[in-house]
Image: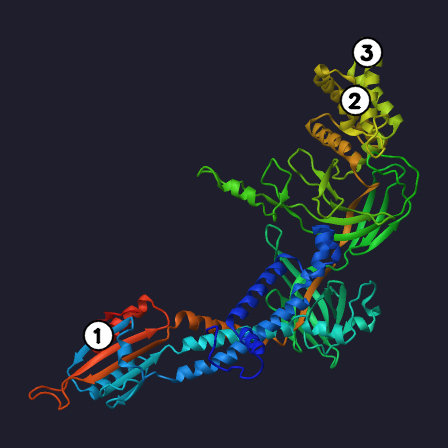
Amino acid sequence: MSESTQGVRLRRGSEALRASFELLSSMRFAIALLTVICIASVIGTVLKQHEPAANYVNQFGPFWAELFLTLRLNTIYSAWWFVLILAFLVLSTSLCIARNTPKILADLKTYKENIRVQSLRAFHHRAEAELPEAPEAAAQRIGQQLARKGWKVRLQQRAPGQGREATAGAGWMVAAKAGAANKIGYIAAHSAIVLICLGGLFDGDLIVRAQMLLGGKTPYRGGGLISDVPAQHRLSERNPTFRGNLLVAEGTQSDTAILSQSDGVLLQELPFAIELKKFIVEHYSTGMPKLFASEIVIHDKATGAQVPARVEVNHPASYRGIEIYQSSFDDGGSRLKLHAYPMGANVAPFDLEGVVGGSAQLNRMAAGGSAAGNAAQQTQTLTVEFTALRTINVENFGNQGGSGADARKVDLRASLEERLGAANKAGKPKELRNVGPSVGYKLRDAAGQAIEFHNYMLPVDLGDGVPVFLLGVRTSVAEPMRYLRIPADEQGRMDGFMRLRAALADPEARAQAVQRYVAKALEAARPELAQQLAESAARALALFAGAGGQASAHGAARGGLQAVSDFIEANVPEAERGKAAEVLVRILNGSLFELLQLTRERAGLAPLPADEHARAFMTQAVLALSDAQNYPAPFVLELTDFTQVQASVFQVARAPGKNVVYLGCALLILGVFAMLYVRERRVWVWLAPQGDANGPAPGQGARTHATMALSSNRRTMDGDREFAQLAEQLIGARPQEGKA
């Protein structure tokens, strides 16, 4: 289609109106609008849509978040300016089709048999020859040959002077055409754009936005039960188009879908309720879901009918014009049993039960569980929010030097480095292992500040000689989890470590451990060193426990290995620090081992033998005791038991415009193929009698001079070969190079 069309024109109105109509119905205007829509669609693909405003503030900052919300980039596909551009694209393309279709249809009906003979000699593809037959016979033969090849043919007999040339002689014009589907492809492709846009507009947020604007519907910003939401936040069952999410736990049913909006949610009533009988999930060896499906029962509200169905990914169920898709899965309220180990002062162990998605308030602990054991007696209220239960955690233990990275993590740099370099370089083998269930929860204080935790239920063997409990913590969702590794005792629990940590905070227990260590470290014949060693051991334990050391930035006493290091730097000359550190660490390890034996004795357990396993346990325990000084909570929750309840997330959609979109897609495919792979060609053969007006000379048969030409909308090598074959078959001539 050209920019300036020759079809329907605006004959009335001012010059400005006619110019505007010409611009609006031109292809250059439609292409410009399509370019803007493509750019906007890229933005909508990169920027997550319909997220809460706080998420944009956290990710991009207040300035850019406000700009995105002002320009409606967070809801770009339903923004007024995007819908307006889409409407102009539909209007422009429709006007362009209306203006060009009459010309195209008229062109399809014409054979252009009145073309001048002289014009044929100006074509790029042309050929001339003399035929030993009369013009009429040659015309009939050539026409039949072209018709057998699929060409549409028209024969024209010209009298002398007929046609555009007054000087033209008598003869026959054979006009043929093929590839008319090429121009039909233009109409189909441009009509497809209109249909797809109309279907997308109808199935998008346009109807919902219209109800919000004209019907008084507003997004709901509160919480509580769905049944308590007022009617102005609900959409009728007769809503012609919608797309929302529905979460159904096992053994329950729901009939209200959630339509997420940038400033809240809308509730969509369904004409039926979905009951989830069973949720099925299968995993790959990497822990990624391989299949998740839902066995459901659809309860019709009008008839009371119960229709069983199975919904899988890419295999939706359909009922009363509403498609039910398997979107995702979630926790449906698993029941948890946990045990709290104290990590701060004045905190006693306790048991706790909860439900994933629920919360519990704890008023019996003190604020002494800060980073370094601050023993302030100020009582505070903490809220535990149970956020997640994962029964399968597959980690990669193939890299023995690492800490077991998530097997699903995509590390492009590491992947490239493994495959670059020498040809014999191979990637490290993966050792995927399921490390068992884990629980996620948040601790929120009275001011609303929350810290997120992720604790594994079972100890994990990381290749360090002793299994450890991994206790993850982070203060922001933008940060990765940082894990505290607590060694497991011989019973596979963290009780041994917790007893050791409690004894470390007890001055009396530290004194007894020092006495035992001195008694075992010194011989009875050297009593003069006992007092000096006892003072050094007591000092090392006190520093490590955070008793009497330097204060940290937030005012709490600093302990752990950092406190020992600070003491050495402050009191030992630089040249002697290495030797002093070695001696002090040896004394510290020996005193802590005696402290561990003391806790086992008080618990009625046998002493721990001084073997390789004990040394590995103590090495990990010393590191964990040092890191535990920075644990930002007064207790640790250990998952002791759980009852999993799974839930399925369905996407329910009523999309009557999808059939229009499917029709548009079919037309687009046909149109594009027609434009790319179908060439429009026209062939003319002018057949004029050879000789004078009295006919052929005596003894000679009738002879005809043939002039042949071919035109095509694209010049290709196939066109050159086709014309060469036609010229040889029709008139027995070799093609000549034209001027064009």
- Residue 443: where, in percent of width, then height? 82, 47
* Type of amino acid at the residue the image marks with label 3: Leu
Label 2: which secondary element: helix
Is residue 662 visible in the rendered image? The answer is no
Query: Which residue, given by chain and number where applicable, does mark 3 sit on?
Result: 529
In front of the other: 540 or 699: 699
Of callouts 3 and 2, the N-terminal one: 3
> Which residue reaches farthest front?
15
Q: Determine whether, in the image, residue 353 is placed left or right of residue 191.
A: right
Q: Residue at x 58, y 64 (%)?
A: 36
Question: SS class of the residue under badge 1?
Answer: helix
The residue identified by callout 2 is 567
Q: In this view, does 478 lie to the left or right of 739?
A: right
Closer to us: 65 or 218: 65
State left or right for residue 33 relative to residue 678.
Answer: right
Between 98 and 672, which is closer to the camera in this rendering?
98
Q: Which residue in the structure is indicated by mark 1?
A: 728
Above or below, comparing residue 61 to residue 632 in the picture: below
Q: Which three-letter amino acid code belongs to the residue tagged 1?
A: Glu
